Image (cartoon, grey):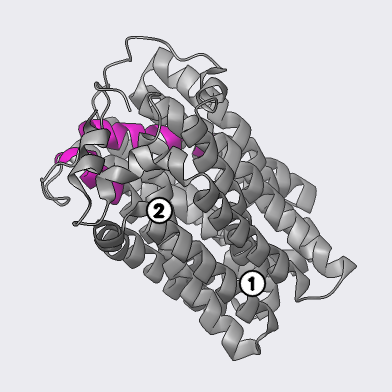
Amino acid sequence: MSAQDPIDQGTGSILRQPKAVWATAGASVVAFMGIGLVDPILPSIAKGLDATPSQVSLLFTSYFLITAFAMLVTGFVSSRIGGRKTLLTGLALVVVFAALSGTSSSVAELVGFRAGWGLGNALFVSTALAVIVGAAAGGSSAAILLYESALGLGMACGPLLGALLGDASWRYPFFGTSALMAIGFICITAFLKEQPKPARRTSLLDPVKALGHGGLASVATSAFFYNYAFFTILAFTPFVLNMTPYKSGAVFFAWGLLLAVFSVLVAPMLQKRFGSLKVLGASLVLLAVDLLVLGYGDHTTAIVCTILSGAFIGMNNTVYTELALGVSDAPRPVASAGYNFVRWFAAAAAPYLAPKIEEWSNIHVPFVVAAIAAAVGALVVWIRRTALTHEAAELQPKHATEDSVTVFAN
């Protein structure tokens, strides 16, 4: 970690933030709502457009595939036109393509519009993290928790909004998201001043070059396998539960609440006591177990395990974000882009592969594959723990030796 870019453990309150930070965080909530928005209405979309589960799951695949490649572009763009203009460009794209998604007459159209939505979301979300970290009071720890709070709240409210609007028509949630993002656009325009541009412009290949650092590459690789498990739950489970939009929305709302609570409150507490790597490894193993029980349990068990997975996902999200931002010497936006470039490929693959695996085998096997992926993520953390120790030292247990603290400081 470079001396000029440390992970600041500021002591300011997470709630005492400038208006610009709250405006960006509020728009981030809506951006993350767009990810889980379609969860409760996936069966309705399949019925409305006469499509199979694997075809409808392409809504996630196109979204995250474009998001992955867009990670190489976000730094390039924001370092040239500035963070504010990049945020507004991303928001404008989401407003347009979310509205167009609601007008789709075929799965192919909807998948295409979701791809455009993914580009806008990538420009917004990756830049929003950098803007919040740069403008937040209380240091980067408070900023990351604020960002994770936005993620958790968005993940929780997305399915709820999808259920409430989707009960009338599967098209309404898309129009609702477009309207909310338009409000976000107005708030960013009003409250966020232009951020200072970096001294050096980011090239398209900088995020890829940053992955040459062993620690960052290890975090990204582990997160790749974790994201496969994560998005198997998010994109495939609604078909397995096969519930009404209201009931499915309630399940994923509870899931999102656990995600928010464990990412913002529980994860930091456990990190301080046990250290980042132990928390991450244990959480990944528990997620693998949860997936196996979900895959082989009855309907009630599947509901409980789906909700419970939010706790493990919340902890994982926080630890992965902190590791990705601090494990290498790369500037945070570059490190974040490289890390996200790798992990979003798994988010694109899981929604497509899970229904296909079910078609080739049975309903249990997709969850077995996802459980194996989560376990592999934990194995990568354990095997590469030495490369990750540099970052993890700042969140070691309180009884960590003086030598380890000295090594980190150097």
Determine the residue positioned at 64% across, 72% down.
Answer: 238
Q: For the residue labelled by badge 1, is the local secondary structure a helix, a strand or a loop?
A: helix
Q: Is residue 406 magenta?
A: no
Dot 1 alpha-carbon crowd within 10 angstroms: few under 14, some 14 to 19, many 20 or more: many
Comparing 316 with 63, the one in front is 316
Disc 1 and disc 2: Cα gap in Å?
Answer: 31 Å
Three-letter amino acid code at the position of disc 1: Pro
- In the picture, the quarter occupied by the N terminus is top left
Residue 353 visible at all: yes
Residue 354 x %, y %: 74, 62
> What residue sits right under mark 2 in the picture?
277
Instruction: State the image quarter where residue 358 is shown.
Output: bottom right
Q: Residue 386 carries which label?
A: none
Q: Which amino acid does label 2 sit on?
A: Leu
Quadrant in which residue 57 is drawn: bottom right
Q: Which of marks 1 and 2 is in front?
A: 2
360 or 196: nearer the viewer: 360
- Tell whether 49 sits left or right of 203: right
Residue 158 visible: no
Which residue lies at the image location 46% right of the left edge and 55% below the top edge?
33
Where 408 sits versus 80, above or below?
A: below
Mark 2, secondary structure of its residue:
helix
Which residue is identified by label 1?
A: 238
Please provide the residue range marked out in magenta: 120-145
Give the camera-side residue of 334 and 124: 334
* Of callouts 1 and 2, the N-terminal one: 1
Residue 125 included in the magenta stretch of the image:
yes
Q: Which residue is drawn at 15% across and 43% down?
A: 17
